[in-house]
Amino acid sequence: MAQEAKFEPRFTLVIVYFFVSFMVWGLLLAAPEMLEAWGELPPNADPAEAGREVVRDALRGRMFTAGLAAVVSMGALIWLDVLPGLRRKPGDESRASSR
C-alpha cells in the first residue's frame, strides 16, 4: 500500500518566521532611538510623522544587521527544533542525518 502524501508547508513557514524575526530585530535595533525621540517630542508635533522619520533614520544602515541577525536566529531556532511546524517528527530519518 502506498504511503499517502501529506501537505507540510515548511518552506512557507520558514518565510513567515523569517519575516517576523526580521521585523523583531528591526524593532529592537530602532527601539533606543524611538524611545529617545518619544521623550523629546514637542506637544504640538504629529507623532506619526515624527515616528516615521525617527524609524527611517534609526534603521538606515542597520537593515543588513537586522537581516543577518534574522538569518542567524532562524538557523539556530530551526537547528534546535523550537519553531512549531518545523520540528522533526519521531521516525523522520530524512532530516535526522543532517545533525
Image (spheres, rainbow, N blue to C red):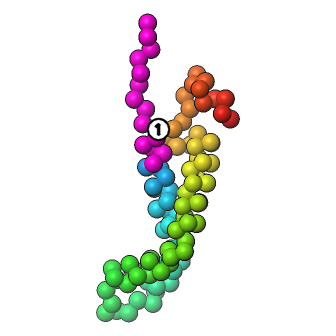
Q: Classify the position of the N terminus by image quarter.
A: top left
Q: Is 75 placed above or below 56 here?
A: above
For the view shown, which residue lies furthest in the top direction? 1
12 or 50: which is nearer to us?
12
Query: Which residue type does callout 1 highlight?
Result: Arg
Give neighbour class at mark 1: few <14, some 14-19, many 20+ (Cα, 10 Å): few
Taking 54 as reference, is 92 left or right? right
Q: Is 84 placed above or below 42 here?
A: above
Asked if residue 16 shows in the view, the reply is yes
Taking 44 as reference, is 77 left or right? right
Query: Where residue 18 appears, x then y in whole percent?
Result: 49, 52
* The magenta stretch spans residue 13: yes
* The magenta stretch spans residue 74: no
Which residue is rendered at x = 47% and y = 80% of the image? 57
* Helix, strand or loop under label 1: helix
32 or 59: which is nearer to us?
59
Which residue is rendered at x = 46% and y = 85% of the image? 37
Q: How many marks?
A: 1
Query: Where residue 13 appears, x then y in whole percent?
Result: 44, 43
31 or 69: which is nearer to us?
69
Asked if residue 31 shows in the view, the reply is no
Q: Which quadrant of the view contains residue 71?
A: bottom right
Which residue is rendered at x = 33% and y = 80% of the image? 48
Query: Where residue 53 appears, x then y in whole percent?
Result: 40, 82
Dominant secondary structure, magenta: loop
Query: Where residue 4 appears, x then y in whole percent?
Result: 41, 17
What span is in magenta?
A: 1-15
Q: Classify the position of the C terminus by image quarter.
A: top right
Q: Residue under circle 1?
A: 10
Which residue is rendered at x = 58% and y = 43% of the image? 78
